[in-house]
Image: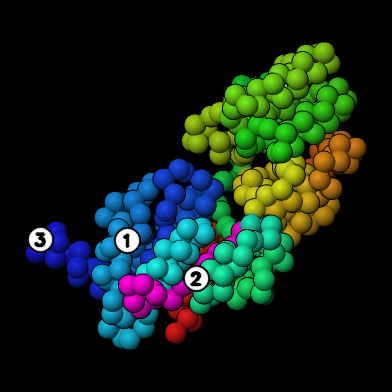
Amino acid sequence: MDHGEANVSRDTQVELILGNSNSNFSGVTSTMLQVMSYQQKLINLRVMGPHYLPDESQAMTFWQVAKMCRKPLKNGRYRVFHARRVDEMIQAVILKYVFGAKIKMVFSSAAQRFRSGSTLWLTRQMDAVVAISKASAKYLAEPPDAIIPHGIQIENFAPAENKEQAWQALGYGGKYGIGILGRVRKQKGVHLFVEACIEILPKYPDYTAVVVGAISASHQEFVDGLKAKIDKAGLSERIVFTGELPFERIPPIFSALSMVSALSDNEGFGLTVLEAMSCSAAVLATQAGAWEEIIREDIDGHVVPVNDLSAVTAKMNSLLSDPVALKQKGLAGRTRVLGHYTVEREAKALVDLFKGLQ
């Protein structure tokens, strides 16, 4: 059997088609790839678009999908097209209404903002809409068919057996580490983390703080201002900007940290908190994304109002003042992730929804 015949045979069994329209790697792309790695154990799938796929044979073009979906599956069921972006909804609608594709259309909505009229129209064409959090569900014109939160790959984000040793092995200084990870900009609340650290780190000499993430040219002035404040406070060796790091270096940092802050003004979902909790780090987060839904107050950490420096400082001080309680919050967070926020759970919930759309 030649390669073309093998593809035809495989295509006739495809039940799920995943949108993959963005050539730039994004959080949406990362989520799709992680969930897909587990979904393919539960359902036969292909991906419309080649971007970042570990197995290029899983990619299909728009025209290949249109041709494949002219007829339903042999059992009469329709294939499911899962869109995570607005342009992927457009692709699905064109496939169905222009090319007559026999598909069921599903859209996952993460945005916490009210949609434009055209996006609302597209959403209403879907056979099912999934919200990834209760917060994002509030911005939909109609209640979603399901709320299915994101999960993470817990094997990639696991706690160090000994956080003190793991932290010291990273070479940033101090006995223990606290940090904020992600793009370094004001919208991410980096200034709140730094200014809180300037206030309280002198009381806790065992701790070093790291700011991990890329610094774009447009935000360099913002970062330079923070570094000047750090230098003036004499804390340049205890509040460290690492710059952008290769992905493989990120999980070991999460694993070694005792506390992680996530202080954004807004988020779609915010996987940083789950990654931290999975690594048994206590968390301090703002009322953004799904963080209020994920974090149990004073059990896994604390949630504070957006852009409230005094609240950030007070809660950070509270966490660092009691190392035993800090460790307990980290352990509680790991348990919460294992029970509610694994990528396996997300993948199964989605597949169960897809199979019910007939």
The amino acid sitting under disc 3 is Asp
Magenta stretch bounds: 96-110
Q: Which mark is residue 2?
A: 3
Real-space CA distance between mark 3 and mark 2, rounded to the nearest whole angstrom:
34 Å
Q: First in sequence: mark 3 or mark 2? A: 3
Q: Is residue 321 visible?
A: no
Asked which secondary structure carries label 3, the reply is loop
The residue that appears at 45% across and 43% down in the rendered structure is 24
Q: Residues within 10 Å of mark 1 (few under 14, many from 20)?
A: some
Which image quarter: residue 313? Answer: top right
Q: Position of residue 105 (x, y in %)?
A: 46, 72
Residue 20 visible in the picture? yes
- According to the picture, the residue beneath numbered tag 2 turns out to be 106
Q: Amino acid at mark 1?
A: Phe
Residue 292's image quarter? bottom right
In the picture, measured across the screen, residue 59 lies left or right of residue 179, that is left
In the picture, the quarter occupied by the N terminus is bottom left
**Residue at image point 66% right, 27% down:** 219
Q: Which residue is mark 1?
A: 62
For label 1, the SS is helix
